[in-house]
Amino acid sequence: MTRVETTHAWRGHDQRLGRAAMTFLLFLPALIFLAVWFVWPLGQLILLSFQGEDGAFAAYQEILTSEVFRIVFFNTLKLAVLVTIICTILAYPAAWLLTRVKGFWFSIALYCILVPFWISILVRTFSWMLLLERSGPVNNFLITLGVTDQPLKLLFNDLGVYIGMVHVLLPYAVLPIYSSMLKIDQRLLLASDSLGASGRTTFFKIFLPLTLPGVTAGATFVFLLALGFYITPALLGGPHNLTAAMLIDSFVNERLVWPLAAAASVILLVIVLVVLAVTSRFVSLGSSVVVK
Amino acid sequence: MRRFKPSSQALTQIAGAVVLAFLVMPIFAVVPASFNQASFIKIPPEELSLQWYSAFIEDRGWMSSLFNSIRVALLTTAIALVIGTLAALGVERLPKRMRPFVIGAVLSPLIVPVIMISIALYYVTRSIGLYGTVTGLALSHALICVPFVLLNVSVSLQRLDPNLARAASGLGARPGYVFRTVTLPAIWPGVASGGAFAFVLSFDEVVISLFIAGYGAKTLPVKLWEQIRVEFTPVAAVGSTLILTFTVVLFILTRLSARKRNSAAEGSQ
């Protein structure tokens, strides 16, 4: 009985204090880790971006005024936008298929989306290199079909980069769109139908608008990931498929100009934060993440 | 019910199926390439052979990179599990309105472009002597793994009835004992799937590794990257197939344990 009494005596003010201390202790490892291994390195890098040889903003000035850097940043944005559009268009029917199939076929369809999430981007990119080669299976297939009489150049150019990037980023678009389709109240479609609306009207006036939050969330994920992409464009692209991430890499490893690398990555981060701030006003990105 | 025209429904379903096939089919192109007999890559191979697997095993560079990958992934998993699980337990004790801010803070490394994290850590690890070490690389990988452990454990914690822990402590169990006998068994599935996620993320990771691994902790993906930038060899296909195998095996294991967990939950109801 004594034990129960002590627990009772323990309640109240002391316990609340102990509880708060306990909660803080649980967060302590995460707090120290993020401070030392995330905030401090990023802070160092941001400081570095202001330590150019010719004044605090020299690095930013060089990047924003140089023709080459402007072209690379523009190309990166263009690539990210186009990949986002293609992914969203392809993801829509795939997400819809997921809502229509049941049982065994649903599991198969879901695994088609989930398995690529787990598999190394490098391995997936390497697979495309083997498939798109001059004498690879895709070219052989096209020649057998009679589409072309000699092998097409599918690798080390825009086409290769787009195929690879869309393939890697597509699952990120499918899942949020699928979850927004699941949330649709089927009675709305029934109501529209019984009021005499055509299938086309029901789709464009009811179904599509209700899935827009999912489309926005999916498009945002794809766009942000595409913006910082490195592996796939570096392997599948040609010399002029330089992206911002590859530029930053060359600043660090070839030209050894740290302030420029730091400034370029800060610019990239600012673009990411602006996009996030704008889209999170329209949709709750957090709730779409948890679906994963 | 009519709603959408059957013909357009069928067309959309076919389009969806084509997209799903596009997602999955190409991934496994490296597997037949690794069993090739010829010294150049050909898909499908004309004659099958295991000779490139023995070439892989006899090559010290490939083998040491494989062992480095396993070492880094195990250490990453341990670090991420401790930090992520404790943080998830902490989140559960916070008032509901504070939770999104704390979760957002832990998830923030996922928002920053990987290239920026990579060069920042490259810069810092060189100055503190952790560049090119297994420890430095594992800590860097943990940065992107902790959020997934936190999310996985949080999901299991939300399913746990808080009255169970309350009942246990009301019956006189000490907090440590309650954690070991009530909380931990209940959140174990979340911890296990978070751990599997962390292992795979670390085992697959390329960009951070390219900057931090150096020579001392060169992982399999880094070795593979260096190789395929120069030429496509069947040994590179063997390396890719090994990465693929690790991932698929872990994926199947987590799916099986999830299924077991679900059927157990249904049985108890």
Image: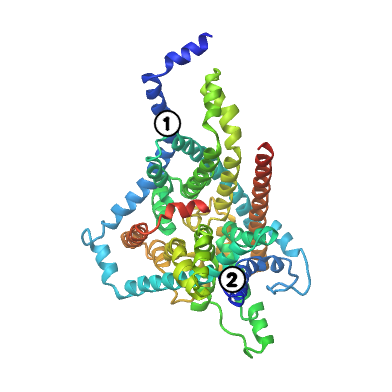
- Residue at the top extreme, as displayed: A2
Which residue matches tag 2? Answer: B2
Residue at 63% of width from left, 57% of height from top? B243
Please state, as top left, top right, bottom left or bottom right, where the N terminus of chain B lies in the image: bottom right
User: In the drawing, does residue A120 fall left or right of residue B113?
Assistant: right
Residue B194 seen in the figure: yes
User: In the drawing, does residue B56 fall left or right of residue A88?
Assistant: right
Q: Position of residue A268 (x, y in %)?
A: 35, 62
Residue A169 seen in the figure: no
Q: Secondary structure at mark 1?
A: helix
Question: Callout 1: few (<14), some (14-19), or many (20+) C-alpha neighbours within 10 Å?
Answer: some
- Residue at the left extreme, as displayed: A55
Q: Is residue A82 above or below residue B67?
A: below
Q: Position of residue A64 (x, y in %)?
A: 27, 69
- Identity of the amino acid at label 2? Arg
Q: Secondary structure at mark 2?
A: loop
Residue at 46% of width from left, 56% of height from top? B211
Q: Position of residue B64 (x, y in %)?
A: 62, 52
Which residue matches tag 1? Answer: A23
Q: Is residue A157 above or below residue B212?
A: below
What's the chain of the residue with tag 1? Answer: A
